[in-house]
Image: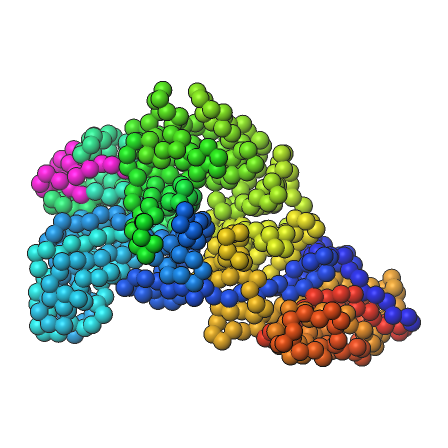
Amino acid sequence: MPLQKLQLRPGINKESTTLANEGTWFEMDKVRFRSGYPEKIGGWTLDTGTSNATLAPPAGSFWGVCRSLFNWITLSSYNLLGVGTNLKFYIQNSTGGTFHDVTPLRVTTAAGDVTFAATNGSTTLTVTDAAHGAQAGDFVTYSGAVSLGGVITAAVLNKEYQVVAVTSNNVYTITSTVAANASDVGNGGSATVGAYQITTGSATSTNSVGWGAGGWGGIISGAATTAVSGGTLSSANTTVTVTSTTGFTATGNILIDSETISYTGVTGTTFTGCTRGVNGTGSGAATTHTNGTAVVQSTTFTGWGSPAPAGVGFGSQLRLWSQSNFGEDLIFNPRGGGLYYWDTNANPNIFDRGTLLTTGDTPDFCNFVMVSDSSRFVLCFGVNDYGSAVQNPMLVRWSDQEDYTQWTPAITNQAGSFTLSEGSSIITASQSRQEILVWTDSALYSMQYLGPPYVWGFQILSDNLSIVSPNATSTVNNITYWMGVDKFYMYSGRVETLYCPLRQYIFNDINLSQAFQFFSGTNEGYNEVWWFYCSADSSDIDRYVIYNHLEKIWSYGDLDRTAWLDSSLRETPMATGYNGQLIYHESGVDDGTTNPPTAITSFCQSADINIGDGHNYGFGYRMIPDVTFNGSTVNNPAVTLTLRPRQNPGSNYSSSATPTVTSTQNYQSTRNYEVQQFTEIVYVRVRGRQMAFKISSNTLGVQWQLGVPSLDIRPDGRR
């Protein structure tokens, strides 16, 4: 029988069976399609930058799991990268540069507010600070402390620490770099100052139910904290006096020690109309609280020892950041928190901490921030209204033009607001051509600049749609693509469903409880949009799917990444991993996150190919390969070609033939050859009614692209 070309349609299709999809590709990993032919994706290398903090991260270049990357150039031509993690916020100056910790401060204590206590032979230090407001995992830097008398010297104390455990509202513990001795009996003196960074966030979304799911007396939001003021609070008081009520809701619950207190009104320093001990008897009953005890916003009360109802549970919000440059400076926002501003220092070696914006009615809470490209407004989505401490998830507010400090509407400025009507919360927004796209949980809006007096106009583009997360959108060539909760969408002037031949594979094996981790990014060198998501059995990102918007074909695979940015200001796309790593993709051909680098295992397998109409068996006995190894970095790179036969669509694959195709050329000295030389013909012995073809590699330094191989298969009986 003559040789037959194995020429398959480009792209992957898993919407039906392996036999029904005959003529295309069915399984793959670490493979893309370029000009219609499968090839191994590019490798990746690590950025060599390190953290400048005295408290070094446990692994990688920075603390925490990064969820946001933003790249911009200053007027002095410094190439800066904003890196937002669940624990800190960093700015890196140039590729391989230092990661500077610019995490804003939550509060700085007065001198003497902080004292220490050590235990002989232990590295645990007990820190006392009334109404400290910290939680386990937060960071604090001490200054002004003196030696405890032994090996716990001033140099040991006066630096940054991470809170290990919170014992009470006034006490927490840290871990010293040395174990105390019997002479460490002091308290650090009367001049110790504690500078607390903003509260850390979660690396994953959690939503527990059942006994103990909620905190004693309520589910703590952590959005606002204050302290009892004006003396001891008795068990009978129905007005609670505190240092400040800024950030608390107009009505709701507060938690003091183990007691939940409901209130119906607030002033600047009091909660009024209080009902005490609403969580019952025992430790949750009304009781006295000393001056300085922490007061925390609490929501959705559940009784101590009672099961939290399903759907209520303890919600720890995933820490997501949005960021945008305002000129050469940066405005950034932790989702659900305030607005912060990082001002470029005239000295390129100084990176000051970000500061909280508080003037001119700046929003106290915001879910997403951006700066409009041409008109230079700061836009906030899901914010509190003017004069209100209640966050409205459907409210859009904008500053005056060219002034991020002025948010109060007046006839002399263009500050303003608008409440969207379709949906229950704004998820995200994205700059597009001559408009800003705004997604709620059920609709897409267009936001366009009109000028005074209306300033910004809003038009609904489509409803009855979804978006899976704030970072699930990408815009290329004036077309916006995004991932919904059950399909993909595109907007090119109108909203359309984006056909995906992997829809069942993706959405039938997906963990939507971690949906806010999902994110999208572009790889414009290959005309691709990537989405990363969690499979059903994973609480971390472990899969990706690629859409080639030029060739309109899909591919998929397994890869753990936490953020992605394809910036024209740096040479290759950037991503981050779970170990505090900044990773450059399309760099090399191997996995450079390990030392030494390791091989990337890649493969692509076809759907089953029927021998004739399946009436007869086929016997395959030779194959002529067609493959290029351009881009490889080793001498004699090789791939494995596999023929996988089986008797019927429902049977297992039989013994496969796995010949190796090896180049005879040295790619260590020359990366590309015009004429490829490799194994000319391979002989196999396989028999079946259907056969699948597979190409794979798992060795260092190999890069490949498949062409059109030929098979010699002859009829071989009916059974």
Q: Is residue 692 above or below residue 544?
A: below
Instruction: Verify whether residue 244 appears in magenta.
Output: yes
**Image x and y of residue 527, in percent:** 63, 52
Residue name at image x 64 percent, y 68 percent = 631
Residue name at image x 62 percent, y 76 percent = 668
Q: Is residue 458 above or below residue 131?
A: above
**Image x and y of residue 125, in percent:** 18, 64
Q: Quadrant of the C terminus?
A: bottom right
**Image x and y of residue 535, in percent:** 54, 57
Residue name at image x 40 percent, y 26 percent = 414
Which color scheme does this rendered protein use?
rainbow
User: Over which residues does the magenta segment extend?
Assistant: 227-248
Given residues 75 and 147, the one toward you in this image is 75
| Residue found at the very far right of the displayed protein | 1
Given residues 140 and 424, the one toward you in this image is 140
**Image quadrant in which you'd find residue 489:** top right
> Number of numbered discs present?
0
Instruction: Verify whether residue 494 appears in magenta.
Output: no
Given residues 182 and 594, the one toward you in this image is 594
Q: Is residue 511 visible in the rendered structure shown here?
A: no
Q: Quadrant of the N terminus?
A: bottom right
Residue name at image x 55 percent, y 64 percent = 587
**Image x and y of residue 53, in percent:** 30, 61
**Image quadrant in which you'd find residue 388:** top left
**Image quadrant in which you'd find residue 143:** bottom left
* Magenta stretch secondary structure, dominant: loop
| Residue found at the very far front of the displayed protein | 76
Q: Is residue 407 left or right of residue 15?
A: left
